[in-house]
Image (cartoon, grey):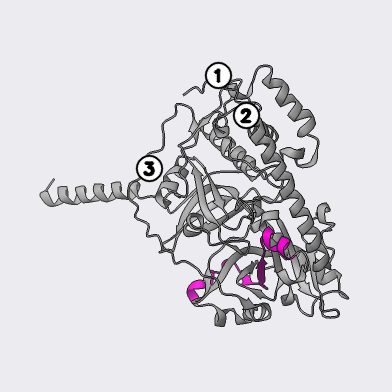
Amino acid sequence: MKPTQVMLAAILVFCAMRAVAAPPSQVLIPTSGLAESQKGEFLCWAAASMTAYRIVRHHEGRDRGLNTPSQWLLSVYNQAHNEKAAFGARKINRLTTDDVSAPDPLAAILNKLKSETCPKTAENFGECDDTGEPILQDLDFADPVEEKPLGFCELRALMIDKRPVVFEWRSLVAPVNPGTGQPTGPEGDHYMVVVGTRVVGGKPDVRIWDPWPKGGPVAGHLQWISYNEYAHPGAEHGVIGPTHGMDFFQIRRLHNDETVLPTTCEVTIPPIVPIVPTSQPINQVQRDFLPENLRHTLPPEQLPTLERGQHFGVAFPIVGLTSAQIVRAAGNPERVRGHEASSVLLTVEDPKGRADTFVSLVHDRAGWQRAGYVNNGVGLQLAAMRKVHWEKEREARPRALSDYYMLSIPSRRTFFVAYDDPRTHETMLVPVADDAAIGAVAGKGQRASDLLLRMATDIEADWARRARQTRLRSAANDHYLVPLARPRNE
C-alpha cells in the first residue's frame, strides 16, 4: 500500500474506534414486569428497594434457594429494626437472607409483627406502613454519601450496565416543635429509582420510576426529568425546598465487580441558578397559561417541544401547602389556600385531547422557569378528575375549565382539583382519591374549610402517634441491643 493509503486506512480505523466508543445518546433499563408501585402511603422506600432488587436480579441472575422478599416483608423488617427488637444496631439496608431468617426468640418477635402489628391482609400493612430506608437484601452497593448526587455520566455508565440507582429527595419544611426545636413528623421525603439517561439538544435528562401513587398505570410512574432537577430539586408538587439526599448505587449481586465510573464527562451540565419563588395571583396565572397566551407568557426556550400532533392543554396553577401550614391555620383553614401561586403544571395533550405529558414551572424574579417536579400519575389524575367534574357537575362548577387549579399537600400524598364556587364564592376541593381519614370522596366537591380542618386534626394525630413510637423505640434501645447471629457474607 502507498503511504497515503496507509494513512487513510489508519484514519478510518481511528474514526471507527471513536464511533464505537461514543457514548449512547439514550440508555434505558427495561422495567416491564420488574418495577413496583408502592403498596402503602409511606412505602416508597420499600417499592424502590423491590424495583432495584428485581431489576438487578433479573439482569445479573438468580441464586438457587434464595428467598425473594416483598414490600410487606421489608416493612415488617423495618418495623422490627425501628423498635430495636430483632436487629439491634445492625444497618437495616444491609440485611441479607441469612439475617432475616432469625432464630428464636427473634423469630417470635417477627411473627408477632407479621400476625398482629402488620397483618398482610390489612390495607397498607397496618402500622408497618411507615417511613424507612431502602433494604437491598442479598445485593451489594456502595455506601451512600449524604447530599452528593451522582454525576450524569456516572449515572449513564450504571445504566449501561443495567444497574438502577435508588435516590432520595429530602424536604426542608418538616414541622418543628417550637419547644424542643425537633422535627415532629415527616414532610415529603421520597425515594425513586433512576432507570435511564438521555441527552436531547445537548441537555441531559434522567428517566425515573416514581413508585407513588399506589397502583395506577405504568404511564403514571415513568417519566423524564432534567438532570439538574434530579441533582438539585427546586420544588416538589408546588412545595419549595426539597434537597437531594442519598444515592444507593453500584447495586449488584455479591462478589460481582463494580461498574467503572468515568472521571470526566463530555456532557455540559447547565449551571444551577437558585430559584427564589415569587407568587402571582391565581387568576393571572390562569389567564397567562391559556393555550392561546402561552407564547406571550414563556420565551421559546422554556416551551416544551411538541411531537406527534401534540398541543398545549389547559394548565393547573399549583398551590402547595406543608402539613405545618395546615396545622397552624386550623382555626381558619380558608386562609391557607390564599389566592396566589408560584408554580404551574403545564399540560401537553395528544391529538385526541388526552393529557399526555406535564411540565412543571416555577416563577421567580426572572419570570417563569422550567423547574420543579410533579409526579406524572398525579398529573393524569388531576386532568381526568377536572374533566369528569366539568362534564358531570354542570350546576356546581366554575365558569370555565381554566378556572380550576391544583391544591397540593405532598407530605400527606393528598391532591385536589380546586375551584371557587361562583355562586357562594367558597373554595371547593375535589379529591382525586378517597381519603377516609378526612371524609374525602374522589370526585365529590366539598368545602375546603371542612376538609382542611379535618386534615389538620388528622395530621396532629399522626404526629402524636409518631412521637409515641419514637419514645417506645428509644426505651427499647435500652433493652434490645441484640447482635445478629450471622455476620454479613462480604
Q: CA distance from mark 2 to mark 3?
A: 43 Å
Q: Label 3's element?
A: loop
Q: Which residue is mark 3?
A: 261
Give the residues drawn in magenta, as a range. 300-329
Q: Earlier in the sequence, mark 1 or mark 2?
A: 2
- Residue at point 70% right, 67% down? 406
Q: CA distance from mark 1 to mark 3?
A: 32 Å
Quadrant in the picture for residue 63: top right
The nearer-to-camera label among 1 and 3 is 1
- Residue 214 is left or right of residue 389, and the answer is left
- The spot of residue 265 in percent (x, y) is 35, 52
- Residue 410 is left or right of residue 422, and the answer is left
Three-letter code, disc 3: Leu
Q: CA distance from mark 1 to mark 2?
A: 22 Å
Total labels drawn: 3
Q: Which residue is mark 2?
A: 478
Can residue 289 be seen in this snapshot?
no
Q: Which residue is mark 1?
A: 486
- The spot of residue 66 in percent (x, y) is 60, 23
Question: Dot 1 surroundings within 10 Å: few (below 14), some, or many (20 or more)?
Answer: few
